[in-house]
Amino acid sequence: MTIENKEACTGCGACYNVCPMEAISIKEDRYGFYKPVIDEQKCTNCGLCEKTCPLDNYASKNNPPKAFSLINKDENIRLKCASGGAFSAFAKYVLEQNGVVYGVIYDENMQVIHSRATTLQEVEKMYSSKYVQSNTRDTFKQAKKDLEDGKYVLFSGTPCQIAGFKSYLRKTYDNLITVDLICHGVPSTILFEKYKKEFMQNKPNEKLININFRSKIKGWSNNIYTNITTNNKQYFIKAYKDPFMKSFLCNIAINASCLDCQFNKIPRIADITIGDFWGVDDYDKTLNDQKGLSIILVNSETGHEFLKLADNYIKITEVPLDVVIKGNPNIHSSSKAHKNRTEFLEELCVQNKSIKSCVKKYIKTPIYITLYRLLPKFFKNFIKYKILKIGK
């Protein structure tokens, strides 16, 4: 088998999981994105990988979605999550049915991987956004076995990962609920590895424990902070000063497949889609208590039934779909590449230059934003509410 279009490949892992000869491995390419690598000595040209690739073999059969705002009724859990705690509520319900949850965690080496959870303690590692492409490893195989053993399974991931998982399964299961994310795109794993290494460079007596790119230390929607935890200290960095988040948000280091995503569309791929309710204040400020608010899209009958079952854990309000799309354009469209993406990745990943130097060279903050950040708070509020009329 040959991979015809490596740039379109999302690295979802479906081909790796389906190969009966274990001839496929998932490895990082030159820019740090997961791609399949085929061992021609083991390959028998059975064609299963080609039949399973979601790019050619999977299209959503879901309905046009209904949109809801959502908060987790457990305030303590909501504060631990990136937005309103939708995933945590859904996972808790599934576990209480003796089910299994699949999601993304940091492993013991701070690598971003898909993992299987059967306890709330294990699910807690899946809270909050990782903003890095996860390695799905053999979780498709594990989840299929759980499904065939009759276990209730919640499988979460990016839209391409859910498409890959469904294509791998090749049939529907009544005991499966899938959850995808409103995905901006996945950044390079090399970028993430360098970010960790450079941050810890002058901290010889500290060990990196956790990175939360969506800390709520200053509330949910007003200011985004990165919270980095070591064995003896907490660090908080404003997103616009964090080189990783700057790179992520301006699309200078995301996967080529994300720039023309086949799965960020309506109808959506999963039974339920989750994300942040950005722009809620323009619609209804009373929904925003600054503790985090999720938006969910219910895309299938399975999703609607599941939402009813999870009712005791959540508070929902139906909202117009167009309101949600306005604040989350990645619901139905791809992110646009930064004009210097190739040069940035080449210098960062191939020439091994520092993140700091690459960010300084290629990511320029518009002067009007720099000036706005220097203004006193009352001037900022005047511009936001009187001139731009944000939240009015």
Image: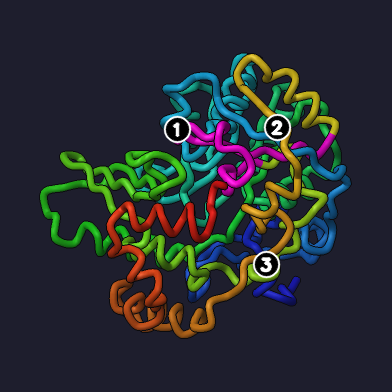
In which image quadrant can residue 174 be found? top right
Q: Given the image, on which type of amino acid does mark 2 rest?
A: Lys
Question: Where does label 2 land, which residue?
Answer: 145
Judge whether 58 appears above or below 363 on screen.
Answer: above
Where 179 sits versus 391, above or below? above
Mark on residue 225? Answer: none
- How many neighbours does mark 2 have within 10 angstroms: few (below 14), some (14-19), or many (20 or more)? few
Q: Mark 1 points at which residue?
A: 291
In the rendered image, residue 268, in percent from the top left (x then y), is placed at: 77, 48
Q: Quadrant of residue 310?
A: top right
Q: CB of mark 2 within 8 Å of CB of mark 3?
A: no
Whether residue 22 is visible to the viewer of this picture, yes or no, is: no
Q: Check disc 1: other Cα within 10 Å, few if <14, some if 14-19, many if 20+.
A: many
Which label's residue is closer to the chain start, 1 or 2? 2
Q: Which mark is residue 9?
A: 3
Q: How far apart are marks 1 and 2 (CA)?
A: 38 Å
Q: Which of 131 and 329 is in front in this view?
A: 329
Q: In the drawing, does residue 381 fall left or right of residue 74?
A: left
At 38% from the left and 45% from the top, the residue drawn is: 212
Residue 217: percent from the left, percent from the top? 33, 39
248 lies above or below 344: above
371 or 326: nearer the viewer: 371
Is 297 colored magenta in this rendering? Answer: yes
| Marks 2 and 3, how far apart at CA | 26 Å
Q: Position of residue 197 (x, y in %)?
A: 27, 61
Q: Which mark lies nearer to you, 2 or 3?
A: 3
| Residue 292 relative to residue 204: left or right | right
